[in-house]
Image (spheres, rainbow, N blue to C red):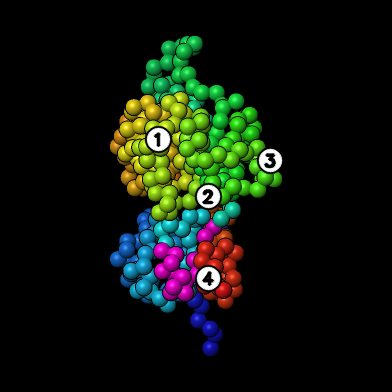
């Protein structure tokens, strides 16, 4: 009798490039192309599966994981994994994987798209034309900020942060960074980086790009106090995770003119957005589409699928979050 294929649950439809890999060696169930499963649905479904390919909005906490200790692998379709209790997964012997590297350029691009849109008031200009307000060229119409010679401060100098910095050099910007640890001098030279503490970065930057992981330490890192230290002419760009910024505090800071504007791809309580942000013309927002290019989403799907299959076949995955389970 042929061996039974392992059963895999995919919580949301992913690109066919990844599903094809899964189907070659697994029995695959895709929950839906329209919505995520609820917690109750996950609890009901997971006892029937050997592997889980999860999305960043699937909350996999200890109480849930303790009810499915037989689960052999969790492959997260994201770089971040704050949606998973890694300590609990490790203690239960469940490998957790993610998709680093493949979305670096796409996320850096969206950071720059937001930066350009908010500093040059692109969305305001588009609305201005569509509403029939444009009556002719004017010397003072929709004045924005020129980037050449300005200082970009990067908070979190991992793969994405460095990719953002690389693009800043093309705009002749000065780039400072704050990180949990200082980078090697060779890397600083390659990317034209100057290491500073977070307070200095916040006080001196004309643009701040958030590229750090979300965890208990970074929760509301940019709170009312830190936002108040920004230049009133500066802009905040967040393509990392929403809760790194206290959204209510950001609204108040923008209203008070403590910073000039913000570009946001992520939000504190997605898909809900603070109503105050919706009222501000100096905020450009997109719905968490940092990795949303065809190439990147295909590559994410392939990596997530390969990670999952490799673990189910007894092999080490390409990108493992909790190394302890393979030690």
Q: Within the magenta stretch, is there residue 197?
A: no
Residue shown at 60% from the left, 43% from the top: 163
Residue 93 place in picture, x, y as percent = 47, 74
Please tell me how crowded label 2 is: few (under 14), some (14-19), or many (20+) other residues with Cα within 10 Å: few
Relative vertical location of residue 91 with respect to residue 142 in this rendering, above or below? below
Please tell me how crowded label 4 is: few (under 14), some (14-19), or many (20+) other residues with Cα within 10 Å: few
Residue shown at 36% from the left, 67% from the top: 62
Give the numbered dot on residue 180. Answer: 2
Report the residue marked by disc 3.
Answer: 189
Count of labels in the image = 4
Q: Label 1 to label 3, Cα distance in Å? A: 29 Å
Element class at badge 4: helix
Q: Examine the rendering and report whether any part of residue 267 can be seen.
A: no
**Camera-nearest residue between 244 and 285:** 244
Report the residue marked by disc 1.
Answer: 227
Which region of the structure is painted magenta?
85-99
> Mark 1 or mark 3, which has the lower sequence index?
3
Element class at badge 2: loop
**Camera-nearest residue between 185 and 288:** 185
Q: Label 3 to label 2, Cα distance in Å? A: 18 Å
Residue 142 place in picture, x, y as percent = 45, 19
Residue shown at 44% from the left, 65% from the top: 86
Query: In the rendered view of the protein, which quadrant contains the C terminus?
Result: bottom right
- Quadrant of the rendered image containing residue 106: top right
Relative vertical location of residue 247 with respect to residue 136 in this rendering, above or below? below
Report the residue marked by disc 4.
Answer: 324
Residue shown at 65% from the left, 42% from the top: 188
> Mark 2 or mark 1, which has the lower sequence index?
2
Q: Label 2 to label 1, Cα distance in Å? A: 20 Å
């Amino acid at each position: 009798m042929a061996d039974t294929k392992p059963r895999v649950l995919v919580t949301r439809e992913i690109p066919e490039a990844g599903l094809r890999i899964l189907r070659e060696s697994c029995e695959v169930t895709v929950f839906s192309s329209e919505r995520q499963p609820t917690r109750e649905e996950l609890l009901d479904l997971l006892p029937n599966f050997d592997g889980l390919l999860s999305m960043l909005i699937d909350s996999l906490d200890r109480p849930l994981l303790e009810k499915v200790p037989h689960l052999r692998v969790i492959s997260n379709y994201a770089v971040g994994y704050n949606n998973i209790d890694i300590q609990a997964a490790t203690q239960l012997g469940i490998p957790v994987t993610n998709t680093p590297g493949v979305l670096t350029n796409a996320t850096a691009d969206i950071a720059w798209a937001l930066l350009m849109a908010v500093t040059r008031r692109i969305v305001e200009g588009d609305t201005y034309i569509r509403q029939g307000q444009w009556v002719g060229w004017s010397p003072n119409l929709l004045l924005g900020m020129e980037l050449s010679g300005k200082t970009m401060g990067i908070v979190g100098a991992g793969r994405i942060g460095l990719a953002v910095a690389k693009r800043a050099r093309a705009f002749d910007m000065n780039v400072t960074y704050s990180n949990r640890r200082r980078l090697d001098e060779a890397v600083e030279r390659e990317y034209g980086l100057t290491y500073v503490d977070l307070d200095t970065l916040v006080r001196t930057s004309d643009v701040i790009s958030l590229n750090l992981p979300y965890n208990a330490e970074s929760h509301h890192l940019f709170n009312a106090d830190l936002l108040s230290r920004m230049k009133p002419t500066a802009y905040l760009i967040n393509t990392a995770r929403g809760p790194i910024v206290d959204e209510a505090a950001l609204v108040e800071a923008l209203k008070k003119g403590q910073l000039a504007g913000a570009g946001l791809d992520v939000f504190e309580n997605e898909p809900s957005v603070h109503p105050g942000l919706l009222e501000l013309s100096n905020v450009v927002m997109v719905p968490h589409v940092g990795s949303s290019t065809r190439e990147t989403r295909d590559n994410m799907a392939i990596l997530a699928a390969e990670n999952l299959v490799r673990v189910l076949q007894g092999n080490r995955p390409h990108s493992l979050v909790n190394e302890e389970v393979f030690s």
